[in-house]
Structure formats: C-alpha cells, structure tokens
Amino acid sequence: MNLPRARWRHAGVGACLLLAVAITGCSTETRKAASVYQNEHFKADETFSRLFDADAASTCEAARLALLSQGYVINTASKDVVTGNKRFQPDGEMHVEINFTITCAADPREPKLSTAFVNAVQERYALKKASTSASVGLPVGSFSIPLSSSDDSLVRVGSETIPAGSFYDRFFALVQRYVREQACGDGSDSARCGDTAPQGK
C-alpha cells in the first residue's frame, strides 16, 4: 500500500531536482548575458578612431576610395559619413557579410584636421533548407507526403562587431594613403605628401 506513495515521493524529488537545474541554468545564462557590458571600458585610447591631417570631407572621401579599392559596395557616401559592405562565402552553406560605417568629424581647433571613427560588423548567415509537402485526398481523409523539392534561404545566425586590432590598422593605413594622394594630386598642400601613417588618437 505504501508503494504508490513512495513512487510519488521519488517523482516529487525528481521534479524538484529538474526545477533546480533549470533555475541554475537560467541564472547562468543571465549572468553570461549581463557580463557582456562589463568589457566596455570606454578608454580614452580607443583604437576605433584615427586622427588625419585632412578636413572631414577629404578623410571620408579617402575612406570611400579605400573601401572601393577592396571590393566593397558603397551604400552611403557624404562629407561626414560613409557606409559599405562586402560579402564572403567561406563554404557552400555559410555566408559572411562585413558592414563598414565611417564617421568623419572635424577637429574643433583645427579645420584641416579630422578624426575618422570606424565600426565594422561581421554578420553570418547559414543556408536553411525547408522541404515542401503535398496533401493527398482519399475517401477516408487526407494525408501529407514529403516531396524532394525544397526552398533554400539564408538565415542570419550571428552578428558581431569586429574588435579593434590589426584589421582596423590596415584599413586606417590605406585611408592615409588616399589622404596623401588627394593632397599631392591637387597640389593644395605639398607638405602633407610626406606623411606615411595616420596619427594615433
């Protein structure tokens, strides 16, 4: 007679354990999600920006030319903002896209100087296949059978800002090259033709 009660007791203990594990898992995921912002230190030596010896419009034009020279498609181009993107396909079912945003700000103390703020986001897309089915009617009802055809679509599976490092250093070096070429080409300021690298911000 006590066997059913024992079974219920064990079942209750098992349910409590499962609930505790679920709560622990949720709290762990919450801690992981909440800890992302803790890496944002907002340091003064942030490497997502560079100071250039050119006005804002010239710096953004140099950034536009730098993106074009590397196969990027320009989406927006103005005297203070440039955006562009480039697509990659590492394998048959993975698609990657890099989206660049460059904002050029004039130096308030020196109009011939400007700062380029750059952000690049890498987005990953996976190929998803959705098989189709068809319904067949019978006197007693209907049922669905799978067909061999499928509809393929790209689904975004991840998005991340590319961290500061050599990736941006290479881009800034290329922008500096076009800044220098513009200054030398129009002959407006031959002193800048000797520049070799962007200045650290």
Image (cartoon, rainbow, N blue to C red):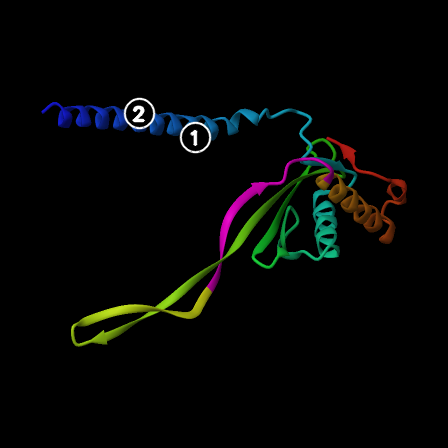
Residue 42 shown left or right of residue 153 in the figure: right
**120 in relation to 148, above or below:** above
Nearest the camera: 56 or 94?
94
Q: Position of residue 111 (x, y in %)?
A: 73, 38
* Most distant residue in the left direction: 1
Q: Quadrant of residue 86?
A: bottom right
The residue where tag 2 is placed is 17
Nearest the camera: 35 or 17?
17
Q: Quadrant of residue 69?
A: bottom right
Decide whether residue 106 is among the magenta residues.
no
Q: Looking at the magenta stretch, what is its main secondary structure?
A: strand
Decide whether residue 156 is among the magenta residues.
yes
Q: Amino acid at mark 1?
A: Glu
**182 in relation to 6, above or below:** below
Q: Which marked residue is nearer to the observer: mark 2 or mark 1?
A: 2
Marks 2 and 1 sit apart, C-alpha to C-alpha, by: 18 Å
Q: Quadrant of residue 5?
A: top left
Residue at 19 percent across and 27 percent down: it is 7
The residue where tag 1 is placed is 29
Q: Residues within 10 Å of mark 2 (few under 14, many from 20)?
A: few
The magenta segment is 152-166
Residue at 52 percent across and 54 percent down: it is 126
Residue at 64 percent across and 52 percent down: it is 78
**Quarter occupied by the N terminus:** top left
Q: Amino acid at mark 2?
A: Leu
Element at label 2: helix
Mark closer to the chain start, 2 or 1: 2
